[in-house]
Each structure stands twice: as C-alpha cells, then as structure tokens.
C-alpha cells in the first residue's frame, strides 16, 4: 500500500517515525539524567510538583543531542549522533504537506524558515514516499542504538533503580 497522506499506510509509517523520535528523545533524557546523577523518577500524578531534571526540562531535541555529544568521552566518539533527528522532527512538527498536482499525487513535506522582511527560505523539500519515511525510521533506529551502546558501556539504566 502506498504511503499517501490520508492513507492507512501513511498513518502507520508516520506513526512509527514519530514513535521512534519520541523513544529517542526519552532515551537521550534518561542518558543525560543518569550522566548528571539525577534520580530517574517519573511523576505519579498531574499537578504534582517535581524537580527540574533532564526528564522534566524543556530542552529541545537538538539541545539534547548537542548535550549528549558534549558528554561523550574521548573513548566514546563512535557513539556520537547526528542532529538529523532534530531536523526530521522539526520538519514533521513545523512542515507543510503540499503537492502541485491533482490528488492522488506525490506529496512532499516542505519546511520554511521564519519570515524576514516578508520573505521565507525553503529549508527543505522531502518527498513523502514509503522509501523516504522508512529510511528515516532506520536512521533514527541507528542513532538510538548508538546511545544504547554508550549507555550499556557506562553501565547506565539499572532497571532496579529506574522509577524508584
């Protein structure tokens, strides 16, 4: 089934991509919390007042990636990750799905800069195809496994400590 906006295949692929991005962000937050010595405690109820930590702060994905990369030691360069995940997420969050052809047509995800003097820059145009979305899913998975391998090497994420 073709991944055209509005189709079930499109919803499944984009949903998988979003789930992978969210998992990657949570993983980075947990890694940085562990590196910072933060307690990995999840809030129990809405309205609860909790400490600001990497799990609760308002850092954007790009900032989390930069902070993670800065936290890597000289013997951990193989675990460095790209900022591309933040670009993908930004395009999904702030992009426009457009086509210049009648439906059903190939759609593309357009990303525009903030306006300046009534003009914007077209930052990216990404075709929405099964292949492109699947390629992004695979890429996010590869980045996820780099962070997981680094966390494993450091002995992070002791399941007996998480959520206590």
Image (spheres, rainbow, N blue to C red):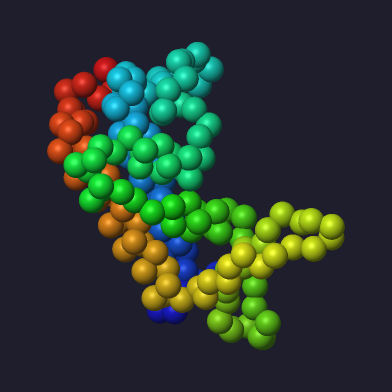
Q: Residue at x 50, y 21 (%)?
A: 46
Image quadrant in which the C terminus is located: top left
Q: Position of residue 12 (x, y in %)?
A: 41, 63
Q: Is residue 26 visible?
A: no
Instruction: Residue 161: name its quadrant.
Output: top left
Q: Position of residue 48 (x, y in %)?
A: 49, 15
Image quadrant in which the N terminus is located: bottom left
Q: Residue 52 versus residue 134: which sits nearer the camera?
A: 52
Q: Residue at x 47, y 20 (%)?
A: 52
- Residue 65 vertical position relative to residue 103 in the rendered view, above or below: above
Q: Position of residue 19 (x, y in %)?
A: 39, 51
Q: Residue at x 41, y 28 (%)?
A: 55
Q: Residue at x 37, y 38 (%)?
A: 70
| Residue projecting furthest to the front | 74
| Residue projecting furthest to the right | 117
Q: Position of residue 35 (x, y in %)?
A: 29, 27
Instruction: Residue 68: name its quadrant.
Output: top left
Q: Residue 6 versus residue 36: which sits nearer the camera?
A: 36
Q: Is residue 157 left or right of residue 119?
A: left
- Residue 149 vertical position relative to residue 55 in the rendered view, above or below: below
- Residue 159 vertical position relative to residue 106 in the rendered view, above or below: above
- Residue 2 vertical position relative to residue 89 in the rendered view, above or below: below
């Amino acid at each position: 089934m073709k991944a055209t906006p509005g189709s079930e295949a499109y919803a499944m692929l984009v949903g998988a991509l979003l789930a992978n991005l969210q998992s990657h962000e949570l993983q980075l937050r947990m890694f940085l919390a562990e590196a910072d010595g933060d307690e990995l405690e999840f809030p129990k109820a809405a309205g609860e007042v909790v400490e600001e930590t990497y799990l609760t702060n308002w850092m954007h994905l790009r900032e989390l990636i930069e902070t993670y990369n800065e936290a890597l030691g000289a013997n951990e360069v193989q675990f460095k990750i790209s900022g591309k995940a933040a670009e993908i997420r930004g395009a999904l969050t702030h992009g426009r799905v457009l086509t210049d052809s009648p439906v059903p047509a190939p759609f593309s995800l357009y990303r525009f800069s903030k306006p300046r003097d009534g003009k914007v820059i077209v930052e990216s145009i990404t075709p929405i195809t099964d292949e492109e979305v699947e390629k992004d899913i695979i890429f996010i998975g590869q980045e996820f496994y780099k962070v997981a391998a680094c966390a494993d090497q450091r002995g992070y994420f002791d399941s007996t400590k998480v959520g206590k």
